[in-house]
Image (cartoon, helix red, strand yellow):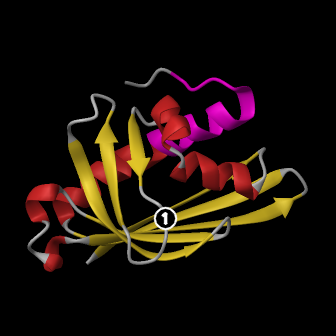
């Protein structure tokens, strides 16, 4: 299986980074989707387009330790019945220095076709999140 790891440093607190990943009103500003869940281990989560009707990715919350770590399974709805096609995303958030958070995103157990997409998608999404948290405005990437 393939994996993708991305590390960035963001002028924000770990809590603000956590909120950017987990709060629909924030994710909609930089991801053009909402991430919807109660973020408790065992709960479902959905990555929903802003139309509110289309779920592009979904999964289960595998581990949740706010604001330090979030681990989720990740799959397209049409792959829900086949666990071999599910991947895993781990967000590790820590304070690098006062006012600077370190975010590491590890996306593992990737099929080759998914690796191609996330290798382009994660850098765009996380760069956009960093812009939003540091400047109050996300870049217009989509």
Q: Residue at x 17, y 58 (%)?
A: 113
Quadrant where the N terminus is found in the figure: bottom left
Please provide percent x and percent y for residue 14: 73, 57
Please provide percent x and percent y for residue 68: 67, 69
Please provide percent x and percent y for residue 100: 81, 52
Quickly name the residue at label 1. Answer: 39
Q: Residue at x 27, y 58 (%)?
A: 58
Position of residue 137 in the picture relative to residue 39 (left or right): right
Instruction: Assess whether residue 132 is covered by the magenta stretch.
Output: yes
Q: Residue at x 57, y 26 (%)?
A: 138
Q: Residue at x 42, y 57 (%)?
A: 37
| Total labels drawn | 1
Looking at the picture, tell me which residue is in the foreground, 87 or 39: 39
Position of residue 11 in the picture relative to residue 66 (left or right): right
Quadrant where the C terminus is found in the figure: top left
Q: Residue furthest right?
A: 98
Mark 1 is surrounded, within 10 Å at the Cα level, by few (under 14), some (14 to 19) or many (20 or more) other residues, namely many
Please provide percent x and percent y for residue 22: 52, 52
Q: Quadrant of residue 104?
A: bottom right
Q: Residue furthest front?
A: 38
Stretch of the chain drawn in magenta: 124-139
Specify the principal SS of the magenta part.
helix
Find numbered disc 1 in the image and state the secondary structure of the residue it sits on.
loop
Instruction: Assess whether residue 127 is covered by the magenta stretch.
Output: yes
The vertical placement of 117 against 74, above or below, is above
Q: Quadrant of residue 77?
A: bottom left
The vertical placement of 23 against 78, above or below, is above
The vertical placement of 47 against 6, above or below, is above
């Amino acid at each position: 299986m393939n994996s993708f790891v991305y590390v960035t440093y963001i002028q924000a607190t770990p809590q603000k980074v956590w909120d950017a990943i987990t709060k629909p009103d924030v994710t909609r500003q930089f991801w053009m989707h909402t991430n919807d869940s109660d973020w408790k281990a065992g709960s479902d989560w959905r990555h929903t387009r802003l139309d509110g009707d289309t779920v592009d990715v979904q999964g289960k919350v595998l581990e949740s330790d706010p604001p330090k770590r979030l681990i989720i399974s990740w799959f397209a709805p049409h792959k829900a019945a086949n666990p071999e096609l599910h991947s895993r995303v781990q967000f590790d958030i820590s304070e690098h220095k006062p006012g600077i958070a370190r975010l590491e995103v590890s996306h593992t157990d990737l099929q080759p076709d998914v690796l191609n997409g996330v290798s382009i998608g994660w850098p765009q999404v996380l760069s956009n999140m960093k812009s939003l948290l540091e400047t109050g405005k996300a870049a217009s990437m989509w």
